[in-house]
Amino acid sequence: MAESFFNQALALKLPSDNEKAMVLLQMAGIQANKGNWNGAKNYFYQAKGLKVTESAIKEQFKQFETAIAQRGQLKVAQSMGMKPGQMLKPGGKRRRPKMR
């Protein structure tokens, strides 16, 4: 529902790049929540190419970049054979066998 309204907003001529960047960031967030990371990156990089002057929007850019980076790290960990919820285990002491 919200996605259709944001698409309508993009079809309009928005007055400044700040407004257009906000709409594109919201669309990127919707796509990321759906699990469509390629679509999210597409909207994000479109927004990144605009001239943004507001500091709040720039902060959201940084937050979204960290989310994309974390997603990339998760993908690398899964390719190494780790399960999605499994944490990286540090190398540590070898367990001693139980004494009888």
Image (spheres, grey):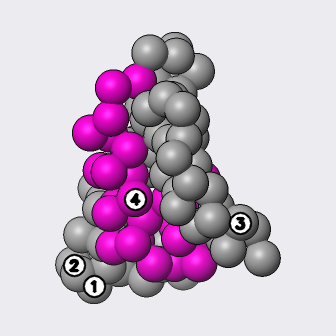
Neighbour class for label 2 at 10 Å: few (<14), some, many (≥20)? Answer: few
The mark that comes first in sequence, 1 or 3, is 3
Say whether residue 59 is left or right of residue 71: right
Whole-angstrom CA distance, mark 1 to mark 4, is: 30 Å
Q: Nearer the viewer, mark 4 or mark 2?
A: 4
Mark 4 vs 2: CB contact within 8 A: no
Tag 2 near tag 3, CB within 8 Å? no
- Mark 1: give few (<14), some (14-19) or many (20+) Cα within 10 Å: few
Q: Which residue is mark 1?
A: 81
- Disc nearest the viewer among 1 and 3: 3
The three-letter code of the residue at mark 2 reads: Met
Q: Earlier in the sequence, mark 4 or mark 3?
A: 3
Q: From the image, tell me which residue sits under label 2.
A: 80
Type of residue at label 1?
Answer: Gly
Question: Residue at left 51%, top 47%?
Answer: 13
Q: CA distance from mark 2 to mark 1?
A: 4 Å
Q: Total of numbered circles in the picture?
A: 4
Foreground: 79 or 32?
Answer: 32
Q: Residue at x 21, y 78 (%)?
A: 80
Kindly indicate whether the residue at mark 1 contacts the one at mark 2 (C-beta within 8 angstroms).
yes
Magenta residues (range): 25-52
* Circle nearer the viewer, 2 or 3: 3
Label whose residue precedes the other's in the sequence (1 or 4):
4
Name the image quarter holding the C terminus.
bottom right
| Circle 4 residue | 43
According to the image, label 3 marks what residue? 5
Q: CA distance from mark 4 to mark 2?
A: 29 Å
Amino acid at dot 3: Phe
In percent of width and height, residue 46 lies at 32, 51
**Cα–Cα gap, marks 2 and 3:** 40 Å
